[in-house]
Image (cartoon, rainbow, N blue to C red):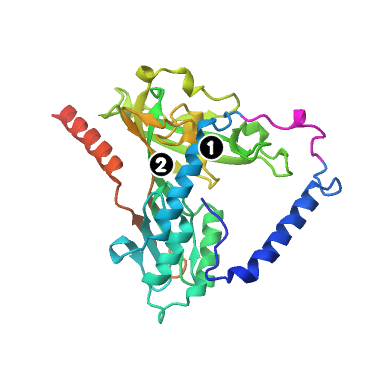
């Protein structure tokens, strides 16, 4: 998801205190009656109601343990040249493994690069992935290039695809576009809101923002997902206005394993994870958004989401750039099984 560039090697002791003071000042201004938006509701009853449920109680302890494990793992992590997916004078893209923080990737790139060829303080993360999401991470080597890519991400000029392994309701669609609102609830968790709530004020003074994702179902229960009317099949469209399906109401026997390819058309935090939850197919291991923690005698220590590709116009040369990350084991097995099934149907 798109965020402002992260500047490297900032002395921690020099910036930690000013940032803390700024945060406290900003919070004070935000909570001041004089700085609330004119249309801010006067009670919680007047705020938009989230359509997706809050994080399950299980997620708190699971997420804490995962964070501790990731911190330990990240302290020992280093990149090698085989992890580099693309590199030129201005950019470098690497394959991020799951369970590693983006900041660790940035530090590892500093060590990997020849310090005579690039100013380390000018390295920036162009995109960020959640701790447990694997795949393409793009890093710029100068402030100038970073600014250009920030603009490209902001204007949705960068195309991204993700693969997700899910467990939930059998999808009644093969291709789907979903539009909804996105924002933080009163407890600070990211939630799905009605599309009609976009622009409304949330607790804390932020606003509901729009988010849009298109999905393609690749396989269901290991079988390639196809429909008899594929040639005439139209992409289904959903504009979220009602509460999402309650995934926990289905027994294990009623749930299906679904592999999807996601194309985020906006860049909101946890966008794909939230939309999968809303559609009733939460991502495996994504306990924060109702994904199964244990499934078929296996406990998942992270969610199965992979940033597969990144494509954009090069900010300096103007040439088309297409970057693809190797598939993790779960994705390669799922796609291979679906492809084998499809080959049998063609015989």
- Read off the residue under disc 1: 60
**Residue 214 is drawn in which quadrant?**
top left
Q: Residue at x 51, y 35 (%)?
A: 59
Quadrant the C terminus occupies: top left
Position of residue 198 measured from the top left corner of the image (x, y, whole percent): 66, 37
Provide the major secondary structure of the magenta segment: loop
Q: Looking at the image, is 61 positioned above or below residue 35?
A: above
Horizontal side of 263 relative to 266 (left or right) equals left
Q: Residue at x 79, y 46 (%)?
A: 31
Horizontal side of 337 relative to 177 (left or right) equals left
Mark 2, Cα crowd under 10 Å, few <14 / some 14-19 / many 20+, is many
Q: Looking at the image, is 233 positioned above or below residue 200?
A: above
CA distance separating discs 1 and 2: 14 Å
Magenta span = 39-50
Q: Looking at the image, is 203 positioned above or below residue 230?
A: below
Dot 1: what SS? helix
- Magenta-span inclusion, residue 147: no
Give the farthest residue toward the left.
347
Position of residue 7 measured from the top left corner of the image (x, y, whole percent): 55, 67
Residue 131 can be seen, yes or no: no
Residue 136 can be seen, yes or no: yes
For residue 302, the mark is: 2
Work out whether residue 268 or residue 246 is closer to the camera in this orientation and state it.
Answer: 246
Q: Residue at x 48, y 30 (%)?
A: 290
Horizontal side of 342 relative to 94 (left or right) equals left
Tally the numbered discs: 2
Mark 1, Cα crowd under 10 Å, few <14 / some 14-19 / many 20+, is few
Q: Residue at x 80, y 39 (%)?
A: 39
Work out whether residue 228 or residue 87 is closer to the camera in this orientation and state it.
Answer: 87
């Amino acid at each position: 998801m798109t965020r402002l560039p992260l500047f490297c090697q900032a002395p921690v002791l020099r910036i930690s205190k000013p940032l803390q003071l700024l945060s406290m000042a900003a919070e004070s201004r935000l909570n001041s009656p004089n700085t609330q938006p004119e249309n801010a509701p006067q009670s919680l009853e007047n705020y938009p109601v989230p359509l997706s449920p809050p994080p399950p109680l299980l997620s708190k302890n699971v997420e804490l343990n995962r964070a501790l494990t990731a911190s330990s793992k990240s302290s020992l992590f280093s990149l090698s040249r085989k992890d580099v997916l693309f590199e030129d004078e201005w950019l470098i893209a690497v394959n991020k493994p799951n369970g590693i923080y983006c900041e660790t990737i940035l530090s590892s790139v500093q060590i990997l690069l020849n310090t005579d060829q690039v100013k380390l303080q000018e390295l920036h993360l162009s995109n960020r992935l959640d701790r447990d999401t694997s795949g393409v991470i793009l890093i710029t080597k100068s402030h100038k290039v970073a600014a250009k890519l920030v603009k490209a991400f902001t204007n949705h000029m960068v195309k991204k695809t993700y693969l997700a392994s899910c467990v939930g309701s059998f999808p009644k669609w093969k291709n789907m576009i979903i539009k909804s609102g996105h924002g933080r609830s009163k407890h600070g968790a990211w939630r799905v809101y009605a599309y009609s709530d976009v622009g409304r004020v949330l607790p804390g003074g932020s606003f509901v923002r729009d988010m849009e994702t298109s999905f393609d179902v690749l396989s269901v229960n290991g079988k390639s997902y196809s429909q008899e009317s594929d040639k005439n099949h139209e992409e289904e469209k959903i504009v979220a206005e009602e509460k999402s399906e309650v995934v926990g109401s289905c027994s294990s026997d009623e749930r299906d394993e679904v592999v999807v390819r996601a194309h985020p058309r906006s860049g909101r935090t946890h966008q794909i994870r939230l939309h999968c939850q809303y559609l009733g197919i939460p991502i495996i291991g994504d306990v924060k958004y109702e994904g199964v923690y244990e499934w078929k005698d296996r406990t998942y220590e992270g969610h199965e989401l992979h940033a597969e590709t990144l494509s954009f116009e090069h900010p300096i040369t103007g040439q088309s750039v297409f970057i693809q990350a190797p598939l993790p084991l779960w994705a390669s097995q799922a796609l291979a099984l679906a492809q084998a099934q499809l080959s049998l149907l063609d015989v």
